[in-house]
Amino acid sequence: MKMKMKRWMGFSLLVSGAVTMIPVSACTGGKNSAGLFFGSGKVKKAKAIEFWHSMSGDKSLVLNSIVEDFNKDAAATGRLPVKLQFTGTYTDGINKLRLAVMGKRPPHLAQIYEIGTQQLVDSGAVIPLEDLIAGDSEFGLDQMLPQVLQYYTVKGKLHSLPFATSNPVIYANRDALEAAGMTTPPDTFEGVEEACPRLADSSKGRTCLTLPLTSWLFEQSLARQGALLVDQENGRSGVSGSAIYASAEGRFFLDFLQRLSGNGMFANTGRSWDPPVENFMAGRSALLVTSTSDVFVLGQRAKFPVVVGRFPVRASLGPVISGGTVLGGNSIWAMKGRADGEMKQAYHFLKYLASAPVQRRWHVNTGYFPIRKDVIGALEGEGFYAANPNARVAVDQLLAAPDSAAAKGALAGVFPELREHVENAMEEALGGKDGSGPALERAQVKSIRALQRYRKLL
């Protein structure tokens, strides 16, 4: 029965707190001569390679320009062009992909957030990127940063192309720093707490710190302390069945926020990403913790000079934990169910996205860091990072990450639900109900139930 379940396993998605399994056997196709699982070739012939994405704002304009240049070359060589389709938020994107798979009309390529990795690996609906590469030395896999590849490498195989990759950093209003007698933002949580009374200015309506109440930052704080989110080595050695984040390390971050909030030093703007950025840019907070993908936007649009520092560590741990931030962002997945010839052309586009020129262009125009060593080396040699030191911080932070289960990041088939539980706990702790410990413990119990429910479906 279990073997049959694995063979017929479909694309999984959290729906109202439950996991729904959608069989996709009818659209997985067969094995071709290259040993790759492409489509059956029975669907209507495509006029373009369909690429679903979730980039918005300025980043979508950069992606559009990259695709436009690819399509110009495609027109000259007779290849299929790439058709971009915006699918909304990351959550919207994975929902729409599930429905497309169920309807036997998936796109050729789909951009999915990092926490969808386990679902997609288990779905049976994707072609592992490593199978598509199939020894193609021109793809440049040897140039890819191992710290980036390791997140999307499951059971020894690279499954998708990391594209919009990021980690969190701390942004500081340089004017506020100088007024407090500082030149750089604090590099420890304890240092932030100590500096906050000097960085805040009630006469200017300025608090010390703001950040989105997202589980992603909670997870980063765990990784910085060398702690895990779930068992089975963060889901890397086996399918996780238990959440283990209601630990001293988990409570540390929530207690930190709780103390700052109680002292009027923390601007709680909720879970969304934009409000804390707007709060910081308006000068209402001296420090902001968020994604490095905002590094150029903040530097260009803030009315004050911006200084960037690494995501803080816990001072009491000393120099033991160096690095340890977890990869964020998204990757691009190749889907089964399309004709072989079309998927070969889709692979050509993936190879283009992974190329040094495109990775360079994406990095310098968005703030997401490049996934290639040669791009970083070239930019360093040209003086780009000397002129843009804020853009180098996230790269150095990534390269410093140790080869550990904590730094690799967690895998979980119910990751979106886990994040919901953690974020509820963060809000409860800041609401002053009964502290971080009970809030995290309640969240962990719910997360364990969800993880075990998922494992039973395997």
Image: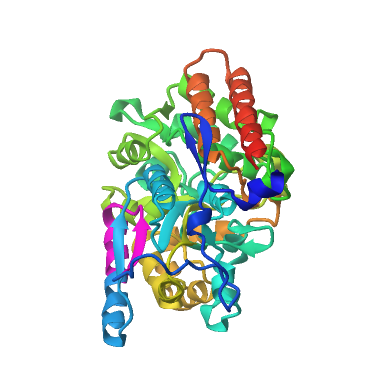
Q: Is residue 407 visible?
A: yes
Could one spot residue 192 in this view of the protein?
A: no
Between 126 and 212, the residue placed more toward the observer is 126
Closer to the camera in the image, 70 or 455: 455
Q: Quadrant of residue 316?
A: top right
- Magenta residues? 48-66
Identify the colour scheme used. Answer: rainbow
Toward the top, the furthest residue is 433
Q: Position of residue 162 (x, y in %)?
A: 50, 61
Residue at 43%, 52% in the rendered image: 101
| Front-most of residues 382 and 237 | 237
Q: 33 or 192: nearer the eye?
A: 33
Give above or below for 144 relative to 406. Answer: below
Residue sitting at x 32%, y 76%: 80
Above or below residue 150? Residue 65 is below
Pick the quarter of the image with the N terminus.
top right
Specify the quadrant of the image occupied by residue 251.
top right
Work out whether 419 lies above or below 143: above
Residue 380 position (above or below residue 246): below
Task: Tell me how many marks there are.
Answer: 0
Q: Percent position (x, y) of residue 398?
A: 57, 58
> In the rendered structure, does residue 155 fall within the stretch colored magenta?
no
